[in-house]
Image (cartoon, rainbow, N blue to C red):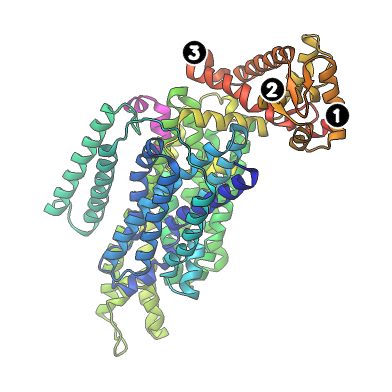
Amino acid sequence: MSAQGRTVSVGVLMVAMLLAALDQTIPCTALPVMNGEFKGLRPECWVITAYLLAMIASAVTWGRLGDQLGRKPLLMVAIGLFFAGSALCGQAWSMDSLIGFRVLQGLGAGGVIVLTLAMVRELFPPRERSRYLGILGAIYGVCSVTGPVFGGFFTDQLSWRWIFLVNLPICVVILTTLAIVLPERPERERRSVNYMGMALLAVAMCLILLTVLGLVRYHWSDYRVLLTGSAGVVMTLAWWFTERRMREPALPPRLFRNPVFVVGGAIDFVVGFVLFGSITYLPALLQAVSGASATISGVHLLPLVLPLLAFSVLTGYLIGASGRYRVYLVAGMLITTMALILLSGVSTTTSTFEMALSLCMLGIGLGLAVQVPVMAVQNAVDYRDLGVATSGVTLLRSIGALMGITIFNAIFSHRLNLRVAEALSGATLPVGFNPESIQHDPTALRRLPPAQRGEFIDAYARSFHTMFEVAIPVVLAGVLLALILREVSARVTMQGSDLGHCLGGAPTGCSSRSEIERMIFRLLRNDPEARQAVREVYRDLGAQIGVDCPPSSLWMLCRIERLGAVSPTALAEWAGETVDEGRPYVNRLIAEGLVSHGDADLLITDAGKVVTERLHESMREVLVRLLADWSPEDCPELLELLVRLSRESLWDDADLLPTGRASLAT
């Protein structure tokens, strides 16, 4: 691909990732309006959980099919499903239809997320790939928590239906651009596809969520609860045994013999539980108790979102610098507990400052904790389990999100029905006012006279209190888990951080190879000692092998060897310099007999090939030292990867020269 085509492609892929991530939470601020329009006949939490459930269950299958059938056509199919789901959601006529169409939309989103990441891995060499994967991870994380802000704007300014309809023209642009610009890779990789496992996981999670709703609405001994719960247990066991028989399971049973994975996964479950449960229902709390519009309720979430993003990045850098991570996890869980205690006391007398302070504390607590479980697990597993362990932890976070949204909804709805019924028993309502609307639509409170509004607002506030009170013991369990988490000495590859690494919770189905590549290049990009180790290869090797060439000449030699034949103009453009500025370094290579000048191109000689081979060997030794904690000498696949990276990628970057890219002009 041309550089321009690659830039356009990655830009369109980023927009596709943005849409799929935003639609996880963008309906949150519109849930009260949707519930009011559809009369609350079904729990509104399914508008969110149906999307997440379909996305989680389908993600790995999309990745496996992309390996076999080609990623470009499958990505276009996924975007088409997302387009169809968005169009149908915008035309939904009932809560049941909206939930069903959200499932279709979620199926497409699972493919968009996984295949977008896979396409970026194909489009770029490893050095650039790690940077763009970090950007995509950042887009996913940021959009996941900022969705309610955009949802509130569309709900107030247009209609809640435009939350979904706005996707349509953007999807058309994405599909058209990808069809024209994105190449189709002819190679195919045969990998087993666990259709049965993914289907069983989706059914099991759905049954468990229904059981949770039933436990709050009915007695535990009710036959509906018992039947649904028993079916959920059976499906979970069936999924577990299916995973054990698969050659490439999404969650290998051997991981559960690793205590760091078990504890870290449980903590990530708690983080997902609180984060998504809070983001989903805080807008409804603000709309009911303070009378905020959908837009303002979304804006009021910024004191939560901004500290969450800032502290997640800060924690990543602090962990990289100190090698310690448990202290941030314990502090995060404790601050989150205090924030939930404050939120459980919110009432009509709570000032905007007090509310913002509570949300800020919640953002700080979650920001300190959100990335630590993934880093802890990556730090404690072998190379062969790096990919599946990372995917497994993010899967548990997603399951925690589903449980948090469902449990928050079940508790809130149950308490609200009881308290509104108590308030209605002694109230005289205006003629023509439907009392049932209060139970499923907080905006209906605005139609009551001020004298009668207070008691019903208090019923809403106390129902939210119960919801947050139930979350407090869950977070306290997270504190205990953080205290018992075994802190393993941090590997060198844990150093450095980026926003994508902090918040990337997408169900990627990533491989160990792609994860270790990302770690290596993040380390080289962010860690001064690692960059210095690479630069010393350029600085010292020429003297060791008796070649009188400066580092800049050796860098050019590697570029010429990589390309086979290159014109002086093209070489200068790659280095970001003029031909005249680069000519002295090329002339030195010619004088040493390492490069010959053909009719128009520079060609490497046999002597030059010997020198570049020595450079590659030295670079491989540097990478082996950097990854000593992963024992590459005991892992043929990892050693083979380091050989390829030393030859194909690192020498492309002139910034790794002893004085950076500027050394080419000095």
For the view shown, which residue lies furthest in the front direction?
599
Q: Is 309 one of the magenta-colored residues?
A: no
Which numbered marker is on residue 629?
Answer: none
- Location of residue 318 in the rendering, given as x and y in whole percent from the top left corner: 62, 36
Closest to the observer: 527 or 328?
527
- Alpha carbon separation for disc pair 1 and 3: 44 Å
- Location of residue 350 in the rendering, given as x and y in whole percent from the top left corner: 50, 68
Residue 404 in sight in this render: no
- Alpha carbon separation for disc pair 2 and 1: 17 Å
Between discs 1 and 3, the one toward the N terminus:
1
The residue stretch that appears in magenta: 253-266
- Alpha carbon separation for disc pair 2 and 3: 30 Å
**Nearest-to-viewer mark from 1 and 3:** 1
344 versus 235 height, above or below: below
Mark 1 packing: few (<14 Cα in 10 Å), some, or many (20+)?
some
Closest to the observer: 577 or 313?
577
Residue bearing the label numbered 1:
583
| 92 relative to 236 in the view: left or right | right
609 versus 195 height, above or below: above
241 versus 51 height, above or below: above
Between discs 2 and 3, the one toward the N terminus:
2
